[in-house]
Image (spheres, rainbow, N blue to C red):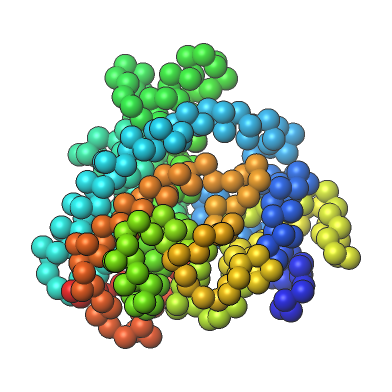
Amino acid sequence: MGRNDSVQRVTSATGGPAWLVSGHERVKELLADPRISRSHRDPRHAVRLTQPALFGGPMGDPETERADHVRMRRLLTRSFSARRMESLRPRVRAIVDDLLSGMEQSGCPADFHEAVAVPLPPLVICELLGVPPGERADFRRWSDDAASAHHPARSRAGLLSLWRYLGALIERKHSMRGEDVVSDLVAAAELDPALTDDGIAHLAAGLVLAGTQTTVAVIDRGVLLLLTHPEQRDALQRDPGLTPLAVEEILRFPSPLEKPRAARRGGLPRYAAADVEVDGATIPAGDLVMFALEDANRDEGVFPRPDRFDIARKENPHLAFSYGPHFCIGAPLARVELQCLFGRLFDRFPALRLAVPLDRIRPVPDRVAGAVAELPVAW
């Protein structure tokens, strides 16, 4: 695809027709365009981005989508406030330290993916939702199953188990509140009769599926980037104060396992609610719209030296968390997780290195950008 092409007719991963939007400004513009929607007037026949039980296709009612979205954001704003995220930081640090200690105790070499990257996000989500420690292993298994993009039966079974569990958790929170998101929503339901237990479960399930696999992939990608860019890793070891900037650059930059300038067709699926004219092309109403987010995050008109991984980059308006009304509400939580991990990793393992050549690490093509099957490390 040419660098000046902002919209192209393509085929989705499920084999249906779609439109791919690229370029930082054009992606921002369409992500914020009210004619680009999460819902579809004929959802059964809509082209899907992937085939999981949730998030792979249209969601919501076209007639109420905007109002429902505003209401959802209002309900969750307190739960994801900067104050709440900072209050979680000590607990996230403790989870990170426990996982790093477990990896160390398991012996060298170890699979960083299984030892740290995979368990960290669901454990943090459990902390956020108020899932008791003794129930977290099952919760993690169900959330992993629910996110199985190319195994519909496994995805449906995992989502059903997760849904049943959340229903039981919500019931308990009615009589036993805590400082957690589910308790916040149960309290909000007392003032908003339209918010049912099913509605709370739906919101909680959305947080689980949106906040686990993506963060796992970013963790794996960040480790690979730092271990394959030794000068950047050394800079972070010398100055841990660079950690917040390093996390933003990890969010912006592609995995070293991916081909340069590969246009990742990522993000949640969107659909044209009306005909949309874009640079001389017409996206017809109902068509699937995908966004080349990694291409947008390396737009040379926005990012100086975009193909350089630079953990000291100060101006970094990446689109890893989307843009506009659908900017990821969990972004502050993801940043806390990533900052806690990368702020501690090289302090605990100053000699950390890849245990195998880079070309032996296998990406997982049907998962989020940066996902790997395993990540062998030594120290």
Q: Is residue 44 above or below residue 83?
A: below
Where does the image place residue 224, in percent across and percent down from the top left?
Answer: 37, 73
Q: How many marks?
A: 0
Relative placement, left or right, of 245 versus 303 is left
Q: Toward the viewer: 45 or 330? A: 330
Q: Quadrant of residue 208?
A: top left
Where does the image place residue 5, in percent across and percent down from the top left?
Answer: 77, 72
Q: Residue at x 27, y 83 (%)?
A: 356
Q: Quadrant of residue 171?
A: top left
Q: Is residue 232 above or below residue 102?
A: below
Q: Quadrant of the N terminus?
A: bottom right
| Res 28 seen here | yes
| Res 217 seen here | no
Q: Residue at x 52, y 41 (%)?
A: 329
Relative placement, left or right, of 261 versus 218 is right
Q: Toward the viewer: 234 or 369? A: 234
Q: Quadrant of the C terminus?
A: bottom left
Where does the image place residue 204, in percent across and percent down from the top left?
Answer: 44, 37
Q: Residue at x 22, y 46 (%)?
A: 94
The residue lying furthest to the right in this view is 280
Q: Residue at x 41, y 55 (%)?
A: 244
Where does the image place residue 377, in percent across and percent down from the top left?
Answer: 24, 74
Q: Toward the viewer: 228 or 115? A: 228
